[in-house]
Amino acid sequence: MATDMVTNSRAEVLRNVRAAIGGASDGTAARLGWDEIAREYRRKGTREREEVLALLEDRLRDYDARVFRAASDGVGKAAAERLVERRVRRMVVPPGLPVTWMPAGEVELVMDEGLSSEELDGFDGVITDATLAIAETGTFVLQNVAGQGRRVATLVPDYHLCLVRAEYVVETVPEAMQRLQETAGLATTFVSGPSATADIEMTRIKGVHGPRFLDVILIV
């Protein structure tokens, strides 16, 4: 009975919407309306490359993330140093992460081949690549592709080490949206600093929706 009521209510709402817009919409009409929207906001960056990278670093640190730089041939060493500092012992690695980026040392690296949430909870952290990063918002973008893996693997462990290529950093959100058009069908997560929220008394709590600790290595 309850299901029938929900279904009937939904149908009634949709009928009212169609009546209000003069009939059913289609893709062509939607596209036309989208193209006619005035876009007066800034759609391209104006900063020099080093300014863009510095802005990203500043935003990330403001969110309580740690940021480091490394040359392309020193990523593995830089990653190993971060793990030693964090005193982690077991890390999840998504399939497709470049071998040369793997940290050496005594840390156990386990490939995520469908690990359950319970199994992931037994790891100290996760290492991933990133599709791109947005300097203005201090955000990096993860997608379900090689080197970035499943979203659950980046949400359950308490620590995230993200490796971001400098050439994949854009200044503005519109630039990021443009770059993401080709992979818009993939599961996509936007991450701005460690997970944190605040209750009604404005007490900040970390780790509610994902890792409490975040390190980013910017590959220059």
Image (cartoon, rainbow, N blue to C red):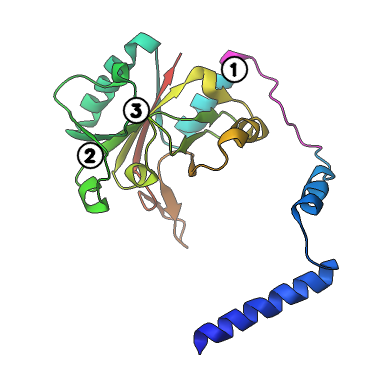
Q: Magenta stretch?
A: 40-51
Q: Alpha-carbon neighbours of circle 3 within 10 Å: few (<14), some, or many (≥20)?
A: some
First in sequence: mark 2 vs mark 3: 3
Q: Nearer the viewer, mark 2 or mark 3?
A: 3
Q: Looking at numbered disc 1 in the image, what kind of residue is underneath it? A: Glu
Cα distance in 3D space between marks 2 and 3: 20 Å
Cα distance in 3D space between marks 3 and 1: 31 Å
Residue 116 visible somewhere in the drawing: yes
Q: Is residue 210 above or below residue 167?
A: below
Outermost residue, left direction? 106
Q: Could you say which quadrant of the image residue 52 lies in? A: top right
Q: Is residue 70 above or below residue 205?
A: above
Name which residue lies at 60% across and 15% down: 49
Q: Is residue 137 above or below residue 207?
A: above
Local SS, label 3: loop
Cα distance in 3D space between marks 1 and 2: 33 Å
Q: Position of residue 170 (x, y in %)?
A: 59, 25
Q: Is residue 100 above or below residue 191?
A: above
Q: Nearer the viewer, residue 132 or 63?
A: 132
Name the residue that disc number 1 marks.
Answer: 51
Q: Which mark is residue 96?
A: 3
Residue 71 visible somewhere in the drawing: no
Outermost residue, bottom direction? 1
Q: Looking at numbered disc 2 in the image, what kind of residue is underneath it? A: Asp
Q: Looking at numbered disc 3 in the image, what kind of residue is underneath it? A: Gly
